[in-house]
Amino acid sequence: MATTSVTNTLRTLHRHHQQLSDLHGRLEAGPRQVKACKLQLATAEASLAEILQRAKGLRMQADQKQLQLRSAEQKIVDLEGKRNACKTNREYQTLEEQIAADQMASRVLEDEILELLERADAAKAEAPAAEQLVSAARERLSGKEAVVSQEKSEIEGELTRVGASLAEAEGELAADVRSTYDRVVRGKGADGLAAVEGESCGGCFQKITGNMLSELILGRLVACRSCGRLLYSGDTRSSAEDA
Ligand SMILES: [Zn+2]
């Protein structure tokens, strides 16, 4: 196999591996983005539920106190009946005092009911804004799901296309080169290959020996002694541009 051919093929293979790695990264990012949107929606829904629950709780407390107030008022009516029917002055006085105390207690209860209703209304007033956040989050989620699903089919198409180009380029490797390449790439993927930059490995930036450079120029397969990447010439001036 010609000198430029091995190095050019490795360069092409490296590019394809990097494209595949990038495409896989994008494919995995989609579901993560959808998950983040789902989390935002769940948070907004929980916040709305808390507001509604709080408003409901306050209204229930107010209702309970309304019942208490009604029975207290009934008790006052009964006491007033007794007072009007009583025989002695002392009895009249006692009932009068009890009625006054009960009326005072009822007024306190009325104030408490009013306060609870005001707080329930205030809580309820928070709901529309929280509902808006929920619907905005829901819209964002469905928008993101649509985009991710669209991108997924595009990315999968690209993966098929690049995978075919990769297989084609791999077919150009001589059998002995191929077996080494397969072994290295199986473990490391795109990180199994590196361009020589100056006199260093483009992967780990360790200097390579003059002997290795000569081997490379002769078209032999050279692996970086430091990181194990298969090296190809980074200099494309002397060879046909395959981009
Ligand atoms: Zn290296």
Image: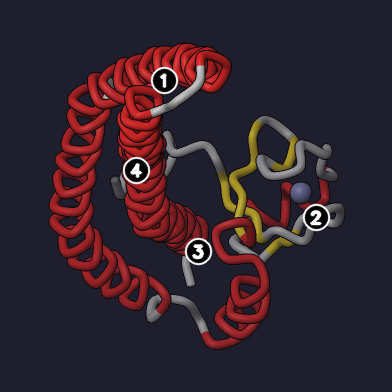
State which mark lies toward you, 4 or 2: 4
x%, y% of residue 69? 36, 31
Which mark is drawn over residue 49?
4
Which mark is drawn over residue 89?
none
Residue hosting label 3: 6
Q: Is residue 235 above or below residue 191?
A: above
Which mark is drawn over residue 106?
1
Q: Nearer the viewer, residue 96 or 34?
A: 96
Q: Is residue 95 left or right of residue 110?
A: right
Q: Residue at x 31, y 35 (%)?
A: 74
Tell me how far mark 3 sits from mark 2, CA to CA: 20 Å
User: Crowdedness of circle 2 by 10 Å Cα count: few (<14), some, many (20+)?
Assistant: some
User: Crowdedness of circle 4 by 10 Å Cα count: few (<14), some, many (20+)?
Assistant: some
Tell me how far mark 3 sits from mark 4, CA to CA: 65 Å
User: Crowdedness of circle 1 by 10 Å Cα count: few (<14), some, many (20+)?
Assistant: many
Which mark is drawn over residue 227?
2
Q: Residue at x 67, y 30 (%)?
A: 198
State which mark lies toward you, 3 or 4: 4
Give the quarter of the image for residue 223. bottom right
Q: Earlier in the sequence, mark 3 or mark 4?
A: 3
Q: Earlier in the sequence, mark 4 or mark 1?
A: 4
Q: Amino acid at mark 1?
A: Ser
Q: Amino acid at mark 3?
A: Val
Which structural element holds mark 2?
A: loop
x%, y% of residue 185? 60, 71
Q: Nearer the viewer, residue 206 or 213?
A: 206
State which mark lies toward you, 3 or 1: 1
Can you tell me whether the CB of the residue at mark 2 lies under 8 Å from the nearest atom of ligand 1? yes
Q: Earlier in the sequence, mark 3 or mark 1?
A: 3
The residue furthest front is: 87
Q: Amino acid at mark 4?
A: Ala
